[in-house]
Amino acid sequence: MLGVSQTLGPLNLLQEITDLRDEADELHRLLKSLDRADWRRPTLFKAWTIDDIVRHLHMGDRMGLASATSPEDFRSLMDDIRARRAESASRLEETRRRLNGLGGPELLGQWRETLDRLCAALAEKTPDTRLVWAGPDMGVAMFTTARQMEIWAHGQAVYDLLGVERPAPSPRLRNIAEIGVRTFGWAYRNRGLPVPDIRPFIDLTTPFGESWIWNTPSADEAVTGDAFAFCQVVTQTRNAADTSLQISGPIARHWMSIAQCFAGPPETPPAAGARRAGSVSARAS
């Protein structure tokens, strides 16, 4: 298992891989502090427990490792997952059964071992490599960033449950903001809606002296404000109304009400006030 201070090799190192590992390290530090009982507590994300969240991350990394090392093994794994889900098992229940109830610190160790193996496998790829996936094939850089986004987004539910403030954002947050901007059209197509011709102007502020800007400047259709808040909205960990974002124009307002930067069927963002930090005391039974 690679240590947090080790590199992945100078010739094939992608910044995205470093960002993925750093994102995992940050969540890992929080999860290591938990009592065993904490792992079984439901979060505000669909009542998933912390065990469920980490199982989900672990299975995503297992699928990614299979894709990065053997596309044939990946297809076999996906066929088996689909067959089990066809037996009336929900996505959540299928993962629980597949991992045979693995949870707590033992799950944490297996997740990190698999993720480190995934990072090592990705580091051997060239930037133009494409990986087979459950949907369309993905470029290795986008795939790696998508794994970072999953950790960041699902980690928010853990921070919220424990009432723990997240560490200050780092520049790697831009990867998640980038996915949020790039999936503008996807949020509409995924719902069978026409994609607007106008893409809102995005102007995000950061705590490290940078502004992140996308699309043509406009005061009529725009989303401006805190980059962290924007990432919370596009990952559906917060309703836009619960953030300080300034949203101007009907297209921008509608987009922020359906934004979804992750794959899968359309998901409904949380209602205003439904997802919030410190909503459950840190050691409630």
Image: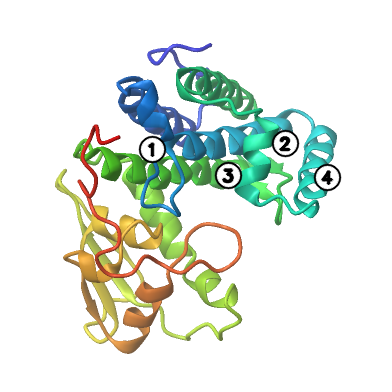
C-beta proximity under 8 Å, tags 1 and 4: no
Q: Is residue 224 visible?
A: no
* Residue at numbered disc 3: 143
- Dot 1 crowding, Cα within 10 Å, few <14, some 14–19, many 20+: many
- Dot 4 crowding, Cα within 10 Å, few <14, some 14–19, many 20+: few
- The numbered mark, 2 or 3, whose residue comes first in the sequence reads 2
C-beta proximity under 8 Å, tags 1 and 3: no
Q: Position of residue 164 (x, y in %)?
A: 21, 37
6 over 160 or under it: above or below: above
Q: Residue at x 45, y 33 (%)?
A: 20
236 over 44 or under it: above or below: below
Label disc, if present, on residue 91 of the rendered structure: none
Q: CA distance from mark 2 to mark 4?
A: 13 Å
Q: CA distance from mark 2 to mark 3?
A: 11 Å
User: Which amino acid type is marked by label 1?
Assistant: Arg
Q: Residue at x 35, y 73 (%)?
A: 256
- The numbered mark, 1 or 3, whose residue comes first in the sequence reads 1
Q: Secondary structure at mark 4?
A: helix
Q: Residue at x 43, y 73 (%)?
A: 258
* Residue at numbered disc 2: 67
Label disc, if present, on residue 41 of the rendered structure: 1
Snapshot colouring:
rainbow
69 over 164 or under it: above or below: above
* Residue at numbered disc 4: 79
